[in-house]
Image (spheres, rainbow, N blue to C red):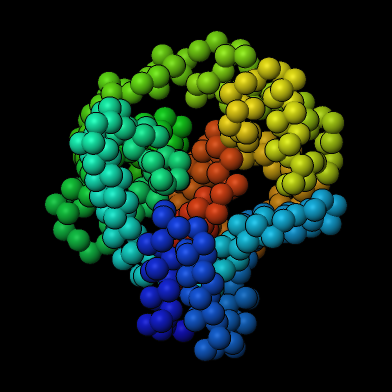
Amino acid sequence: MESPSLIHRIFLSLWVLLLPFWDLGAGVALVLAFFAAVLPNLSAARRRWSQSAPMWPLWGVVLMVVLGSLWHPTSLDGYLRHLPLILVFWAYDRESIARSLPVGAIAVMAFLLGAGMLRVIEGAQWDTLVYRGLLKGLHQHVYIGTYLLLAALAVQNGPWSGRIKGFFWALTLLFLGLLGAKMLLISALLAAGWVAFRDRSFPRWALPAVAILTLGFGLAQGLAQGRAMGHVLKPVDPHWATGSVDTRIVQVQAAWELIQEKPWLGWGPESTQPALNARYTQMDYRFGVKRALNVHNQWVEWALTYGLVGLGIWLVTAAAGFRVARPNPLTLGVFVLYFGSLWLTESFMERSLGVSLVAMAWMWGVVPKKEN
């Protein structure tokens, strides 16, 4: 594509800044960025299509959703939620993303900490500054944490001084610790371990980073009400399940029973949650019924929704893309270890923010720089 126009960069930056705060506004900004990139030069957009093989693994998800609608009804929201997987390919501009992400991350942290301190001043308990109490009004911690990590990577790869990079990483890690997203932290450590393995060494800032992260997580554990580690390591009993681990095990068990009933075509996006709720009732899983919880496992969620046929469509498309375009093993490994492991504990792609973050991370880290 040609060099991005000013209006293109404005809309794309607006998309990045609105992502954590407003799904609809962010979606509209991305659509406008797409048109600003494509309409001025349709011939360049057509040439761009010839370079799309690196995107096929993500477009396989879109194909699974579209073809799945042939045997299951799909709402307009289901289509719109996956639209960033297509639009980001044409709208993407690395420089605009790299400049906007740090600004967005600072805005998120300032907003959440400021709102939390205001609640404390008004009489709330200190635990409003940790876990989900800190995220009142915004998305879950796995989404916000992923956004902050991408912003920190943008700063790391930017033109800033070492002191600014160190300060931004320290602030990000402290905030991630306060969020206490255990599954996200495990996924991030797996990705960091892959980088260390490829480099055959640990960076000199590894120990300070762990210390800062431990400080934030320790504060979260000390202030938490009912979300400490003891709450996580509980026996699995559907009747009493409310923790981080036992709930996910119960939800996957319920989904597996439903998958066995409709293994080939799945239940469809409109029937999956009602079927889960009914199975939760049979299991006496009160917490799941009260919260109408999804599977909290993206792989199982797709199998439950689209069946083995849907998963097969996605896998064939992804394999074809990898055969044509061979991504960098380092960045592909980081992406697969982080998001692949996170998808084991979260139905990450069931929200528009999750889809957008995956599309952004894939374009930034996996698709070769010369092609985006």
**Image point 40% across, 34% down: which residue?**
132
Image position of 350 with respect to 22: above or below: above
**Image point 23% across, 64% down: which residue?**
159
**Image point 77% across, 42% down: which residue?**
271
Q: Is residue 306 visible?
A: no
Q: For this view, does 273 lie left or right of residue 212?
A: right
* Residue 101 location (% of width, % of height): 34, 59
* Residue 87 location (% of width, % of height): 57, 69
Q: Is residue 24 visible?
A: yes
* Residue 355 location (% of width, % of height): 55, 54
Q: Residue furthest left?
A: 163
Q: For this view, does 43 lie left or right of residue 116?
A: right
Q: Residue furthest top?
A: 235
Q: Nearer the viewer, residue 75 or 262?
A: 75
Q: For this view, does 80 lie left or right of residue 365?
A: right
Q: Residue furthest front?
A: 122
Occupied quadrant, residue 275: top right
